[in-house]
């Protein structure tokens, strides 16, 4: 259906793509993987008609095509779907699908019935449970993705490029998402799936190609696809689940939680964390793990229960209290709740502890030179790659943005470190570095809580794993007893209907 | 780098070109000491109200009540004069009224989550009603103490008092915004309020303080205007609102990230002030002045956009 041959693209002296060829048939899902900067984005832009290649040919259905604009690619049936492609929140699925398309008319008026039928015909096949008539604002994130897919296929999209479609979805929803992809595949749609989640690529793709430095370094067919091979080809290192001795039972208890009820955490939860220990909180989104962190951070009210920090009662009323108690926090969804994208790196780093950079004690005027050197030290500690301390935070890659948020707390001793989805939406290499940083933070004698929807991450990081489900802690595993199967079973035993 | 500098200093260059143009077109009238003096008088009130707007826009909000606060403060001050109170009571009382109005704005926005556009428009309407009531709808000009008149008239060592007000108010505001922890927090709130809250900043308090300061500054501007004119009308501050925001928006074109700054706002005030002044000298019809001012704002922001896309 789609064939690319010898695609080449240069930006100045760098070869973004060099002699990249791929072919895609109807009813096939092709995985496209590579580190950030490997050339994936450039390739997608060329397929979408958003960028012209310097060399190479594109053919659709065997006919050579030249895309001069995204419109040409669209006319050829190509749809690139970004995970955060905008939908109109107050419009329902049908109206969103028809956005930018001519409306069917009857006697001069918009024919809503015909619109509904046009969409429902496809919805029945790929996402039968999707509600078509309620504003998409009320749909869970996974179903918003279905709306984007539905919009593409109902408008004659035959070749779909899905850019990180599951990055923002918890594991359970990702499964539902792939059920839809399966049905689309069965109808003969050709799909290119770009994902950092290599397990998804291995599980759902018929084939995968691996890009590295702008070249195709490996092409794996179904039988050969596994995570370890993909990682090797990408040039990363596959972290073996290294054995660590358990944290000594004699280690100091830093954090003790008794019968905590807060937000989505409805069943009283108790937990103690020792110095140097990493406790992973694993569960689907909405299972209560994030609520626990928010309560400890003072960002959500504690409804019941008590917390002790190094033996003293601790009840933060605001994040300010938490900061002062040497508790640190890295929020999930960094774009919305963590990053100041339009401000520079030093600003982003020093903001929460700004008063510790005063030139004259008591005078609330930051010493910019002290800030800058603290930033450089912290950036080094979290191995952040950046051009200049004055660059805007939004110009960093996802992984470096996350490291920037980590760096806020890097120059002080945190008694408790709270991390919510710390490796969400970052590439494999950065993921590895961030995991190392987390281990290092624990090794400094901090108590670390990591909330995650990534099972392997929970297993890899946690000295102990608490499994959350429907607002309760349903299981606790010591590192030695934890296994992927046990975790999944506990987390999804009774999956919530949605 | 040169492209960046050009887009950064473009607004300043435009201002200088404007001054040079008027100096050539009206050599006898524009670049004279008397006219510069006159310009400063015209700009001072606007500069202070625009600074209030700048502070509020830094946290990503709007304050549409600035002009109404200015009117109310002037009315309160003159009403107290009418009752026989002297400057030392009337002026602080008027400033406090502006501060209180600002606190009310801040509480409505930060505590009750009402969009600032709506909250400040509603509160401004209330303020204008209060000013109307307190003034009885009539012009007030009686029993004004001489001490009050010197607030905005005359000069110190040859420098007009109003110029000193501009330097003092804008200087302090600029210092606070760029150099202090408070200013840093305001920029953070404007950048991403949710992230600021989660980073442990006292967002609610800072928002209320910002609106309060904006209210007090607006009141000060109202008093200076009253002092200069020697009389008060209950609607006198209202025409300040749009030019104040126009100045802030022109000012944002001087910043690499398009964020408001006091220096940029001063430039915006100067550009609109010089434009109006120069065109009046050249005898341009007032209606054409208005149209041209609007066009210039749009062009400035458009050029800025294009500059940014080019980068």
Image (spheres, coloured by chain):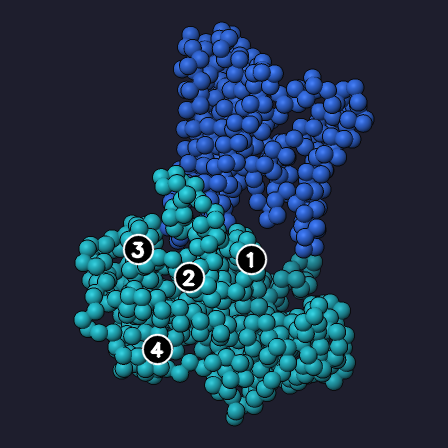
Q: Is residue A487 visible to us here?
A: yes
Q: Chain of mark 2?
A: A
The residue under the point 65% across, 30% down is: B270
Left or right of B48 on screen, residue B269: right
Q: Earlier in the sequence, mark 2 or mark 1?
A: 1
> At 52% from the left edge and 69% from the top edge, which residue is drawn?
A145
Query: Is disc 4 placed on a helix, strand or loop?
Result: helix
The image quadrant of residue B50 is top right
Which residue is tagged 4?
A459
Residue at 44% over, 50% down:
A370
Q: CA distance from mark 2 to mark 3?
A: 14 Å
Chain A: drawing colour? cyan
Residue A155 location (% of width, % of height): 64, 71
The N terminus of chain A appears in which quarter of the rendering? bottom right
Residue at point 25% right, 74% down?
A: A247
Query: Is any part of residue B297 visible from this angle?
Result: no
Chain under disc 3: A
- When the figure is inspected, residue B311 is found, relative to residue B6, above or below; the finding is below
């Amino acid at each position: 259906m789609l064939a690319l041959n010898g695609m080449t693209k240069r930006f100045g002296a760098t070869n973004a793509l060099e002699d990249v060829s791929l072919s895609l048939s109807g009813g096939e899902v092709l995985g496209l993987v590579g580190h950030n900067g490997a050339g994936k984005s450039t390739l997608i832009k060329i397929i979408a008609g958003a960028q012209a290649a310097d060399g190479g040919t594109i053919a659709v259905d065997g006919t050579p095509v030249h895309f001069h604009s995204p419109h040409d690619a669209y006319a050829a049936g190509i749809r690139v779907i970004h995970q955060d492609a905008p939908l109109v929140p107050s419009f329902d699925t049908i109206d969103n699908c028809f956005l930018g398309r001519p409306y069917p008319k009857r006697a001069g008026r918009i024919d809503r019935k015909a619109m509904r039928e046009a969409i429902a015909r496809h919805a029945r096949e790929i996402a039968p449970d999707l509600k078509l008539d309620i504003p998409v604002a009320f749909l869970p994130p996974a179903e918003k993705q279905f709306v984007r897919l539905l919009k593409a296929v109902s408008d004659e999209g035959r070749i779909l490029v899905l850019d990180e479609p599951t990055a923002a979805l918890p594991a359970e929803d990702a499964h539902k998402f792939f059920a839809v992809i399966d049905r689309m595949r069965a109808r003969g749609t050709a799909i290119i799936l770009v994902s950092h989640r290599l397990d998804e690529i291995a599980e759902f793709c018929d084939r995968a190609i691996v890009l590295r430095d702008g070249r195709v370094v490996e092409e794996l067919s179904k039988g050969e696809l596994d995570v370890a091979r993909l990682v090797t080809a990408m040039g990363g290192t596959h972290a073996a689940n290294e054995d660590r001795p358990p944290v000594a039972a004699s280690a100091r208890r830093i954090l003790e939680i008794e019968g905590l009820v807060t937000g989505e955490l409805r069943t009283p939860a108790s937990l103690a964390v020792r110095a140097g220990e990493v406790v992973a909180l694993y569960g689907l989104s909405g299972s209560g793990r994030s609520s626990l962190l928010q309560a400890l951070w003072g960002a959500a009210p504690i409804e019941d229960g008590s917390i002790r920090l190094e033996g003293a009662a601790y009840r933060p009323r605001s994040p300010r209290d938490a900061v002062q108690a040497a508790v640190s926090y890295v929020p999930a969804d960094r774009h919305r709740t963590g990053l100041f994208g339009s401000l520079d790196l030093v600003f982003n780093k020093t903001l929460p502890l700004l008063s510790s950079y005063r030139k004259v004690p008591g005078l609330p005027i930051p010493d910019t030179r002290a800030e800058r050197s603290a930033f450089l030290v912290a950036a080094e500690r979290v191995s952040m790659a950046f051009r200049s301390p004055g660059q805007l935070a939004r110009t960093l890659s996802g992984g470096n943005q996350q490291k920037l948020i980590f760096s806020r707390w890097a120059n002080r001793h945190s008694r408790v470190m709270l991390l919510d989805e710390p490796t969400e939406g970052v590439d494999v290499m950065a993921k590895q570095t961030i995991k190392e940083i987390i281990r290092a933070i624990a090794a400094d004698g901090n108590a670390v809580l990591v909330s995650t929807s990534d099972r392997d991450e929970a297993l890899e990081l946690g000295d102990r794993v608490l499994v959350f489900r429907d607002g309760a802690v349903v299981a606790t595993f010591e590192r030695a007893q934890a296994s992927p199967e046990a975790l999944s079973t506990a987390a999804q035993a009774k999956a919530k209907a949605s | 780098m040169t492209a960046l500098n050009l887009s950064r200093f473009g607004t300043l260059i435009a201002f200088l070109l404007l001054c040079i143009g008027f100096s050539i077109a009206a050599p006898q009238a524009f670049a004279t000491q008397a006219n510069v003096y006159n310009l400063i008088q015209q700009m001072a009130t606007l500069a202070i109200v625009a600074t209030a707007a700048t502070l509020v826009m830094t946290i990503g909000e709007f304050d549409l009540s600035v002009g109404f606060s200015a009117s109310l403060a002037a009315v309160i001050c003159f009403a107290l004069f009418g009752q026989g109170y002297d400057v030392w009571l009337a002026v602080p009382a008027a400033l406090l009224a502006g501060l209180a109005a600002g606190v009310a704005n801040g509480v409505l926005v930060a505590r009750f989550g009402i969009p600032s556009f709506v909250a400040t428009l509603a509160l401004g309407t209330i303020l204008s009603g209060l000013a109307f009531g307190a003034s009885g709808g009539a012009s007030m000009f009686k029993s004004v103490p001489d001490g009050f008149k010197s607030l905005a008239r005359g000069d110190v060592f040859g420098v007009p008092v109003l110029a000193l007000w501009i330097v003092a108010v804008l200087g302090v505001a600029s210092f606070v915004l760029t150099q202090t922890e408070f200013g840093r927090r305001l920029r953070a709130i404007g950048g991403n309020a949710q992230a600021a809250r989660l980073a442990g900043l006292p967002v609610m308090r800072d928002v209320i303080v910002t609106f309060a300061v904006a209210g007090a500054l607006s009141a000060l501007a109202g008093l200076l205007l009253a002092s200069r004119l020697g009389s008060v009308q209950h609607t006198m501050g209202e025409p300040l609102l749009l030019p104040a925001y126009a100045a802030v928006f022109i000012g944002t074109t001087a910043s690499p990230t398009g964020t408001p700054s006091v220096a940029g706002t001063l430039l915006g005030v100067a550009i609109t002030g010089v434009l109006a002044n120069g065109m009046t000298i050249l005898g341009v019809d007032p209606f054409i002045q208005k149209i041209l001012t609007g066009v210039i704002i749009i062009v400035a922001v458009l050029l800025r956009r294009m500059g940014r896309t080019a980068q």
